[in-house]
Amino acid sequence: DQQVKQNSPSLSVQEGRISILNCDYTNSMFDYFLWYKKYPAEGPTFLISISSIKDKNEDGRFTVFLNKSAKHLSLHIVPSQPGDSAVYFCAASADGFGNEKLTFGTGTRLTIIP
Amino acid sequence: DTAVSQTPKYLVTQMGNDKSIKCEQNLGHDTMYWYKQDSKKFLKIMFSYNNKELIINETVPNRFSPKSPDKAHLNLHINSLELGDSAVYFCASSPRGQFYGYTFGSGTRLTVV
């Protein structure tokens, strides 16, 4: 039962353009969403998050959008840089405090073309 | 100075053996976790401990046993290893209730032959 889905296993974007990574979820109890970035042979590192009470959160070049009615979130990176090439994981959680379990998608490999 | 460190980084072992993976965090976090990333790239939680107390125990075979001697350490023991246990195992830690502080180790690639 895959509750968090990233349907695009890979994405290539020209440097300087916008990268859009998508994520869908099925569990309506999820109330907190995160994006993680992972380089080879390293653990995932936290990138940006959003609570279900918001529909947008911005941090520098990174913006996460949440559409609760569609159970969809997306990560926008603009402008894209070569260092952004990595695997991006979407993650979600329900019942925040006391149960910090994260449910992850399978990741999207982003390649930025110089 | 690594925040969440796992050892070993690579582990190759034969079926039926017993092995351990160690994890230590120096962030002062209360909660530690073990996640497993299988061949299909699913990253799934196995266990979480809060201040040495087991909080989450997902459907994991009894052959897997976590041990937390103190809140800075969470080790994973695996008995009678099977081929299907081959995966990358990630340790993580977080301050309780604060996801933005969730920090992962670099992973242990376990290969059972």
Image (cartoon, rainbow, N blue to C red):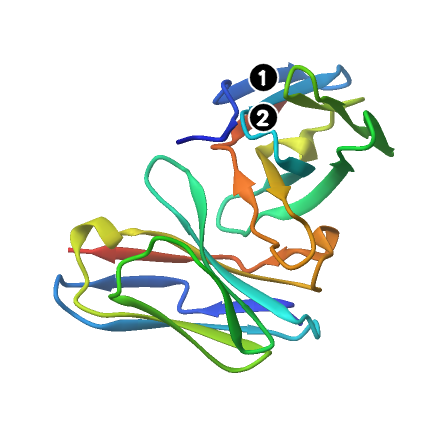
Q: Which residue is mark 2?
A: A110
Nearer to us in this view, B98 or A114: B98
Which label sits on residue A1?
none
Q: Residue at x 64, y 59 (%)?
A: A98
Is B76 situated left or right of A26 in this image? left
Q: Residue at x 19, y 62 (%)?
A: B81
Q: Which residue is mark 1?
A: A12
Chain name for mark 1:
A
Question: Which quadrant of the figure contains the N terminus of chain A?
Answer: top left
| Residues packed near mark 1 inside 10 Å, few (<14), some (14 to 19) or many (20 plus) | few
In which quarter of the view is residue A85 placed?
top right
Q: For the residue marked with disc 1, what is the amino acid? A: Ser
Res A33 seen here: no
Residue A12 pos. (x, y %): 58, 17
User: Could you tell me which secondary element the residue under label 1 belongs to?
Assistant: strand
Question: Which quadrant of the figure contains the C terminus of chain A?
Answer: top right
